[in-house]
Amino acid sequence: MKDFTNIDPNKILFSNEYFFIIKDNFPVSPGHLLIITNKVRNNFFELTKEEHGNLNEVIEIAKGIIEKEFKPDGYNIGMNCGEAAGQTVFHFHCHLIPRYNGDMENPRGGVRHCINGKGYY
């Protein structure tokens, strides 16, 4: 099973009791980060009550890390839950993807583009 249990500690930008943050190895945009559970949980729906309660705070911390180096114009926050949703690593991770004006010709629809033809409405 692929997971994030063997991350080099030098790559960890932040950690607390429930999560740690690293740079994405295959960034979609400059500054793309991953928020990962310390304990292996398959996806968002398997997080504990405590992890759910802490996730928003860690997303804000990740945003602060990004903004120390980059000046994004927006963000996408993404979690793939299950193989049908495109999940390939079955260890909870939340993508915080900085977005920049002009990085797409027409960003309207955002994450709706994950299903072909559904992004434009």
Image (cartoon, helix red, strand yellow):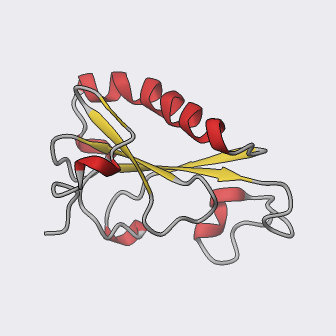
- Is residue 120 rendered to the left or right of residue 24? right
Q: Which residue occupies the extreme front position in the image?
A: 10
Q: Which residue occupies the extreme bottom position in the image?
A: 116
Q: Is 103 situated above or below 57?
A: below
Viewer-nearest residue: 2 or 12:
12
Q: What is the quadrant of residue 82 in the picture?
A: bottom left
Q: Residue at x 65, y 37 (%)?
A: 67
Viewer-nearest residue: 28 or 113:
28
Viewer-nearest residue: 14 or 51:
14
Viewer-nearest residue: 17 or 14:
14
Q: How many marks?
A: 0
Q: Residue at x 74, y 58 (%)?
A: 109
Q: Position of residue 64 (x, y in %)?
A: 58, 31
Q: Position of residue 96 (x, y in %)?
A: 53, 47
Q: Residue at x 19, y 68 (%)?
A: 2
Q: Quadrant of the N terminus?
A: bottom left
Q: Quadrant of the C terminus?
A: bottom right
Q: Residue at x 63, y 62 (%)?
A: 29
Q: Position of residue 59 (x, y in %)?
A: 49, 33
Q: What is the quadrant of residue 14 in the picture?
A: top left
Q: Position of residue 36 (x, y in %)?
A: 31, 45
- Is residue 2 rendered to the left or right of residue 100? left
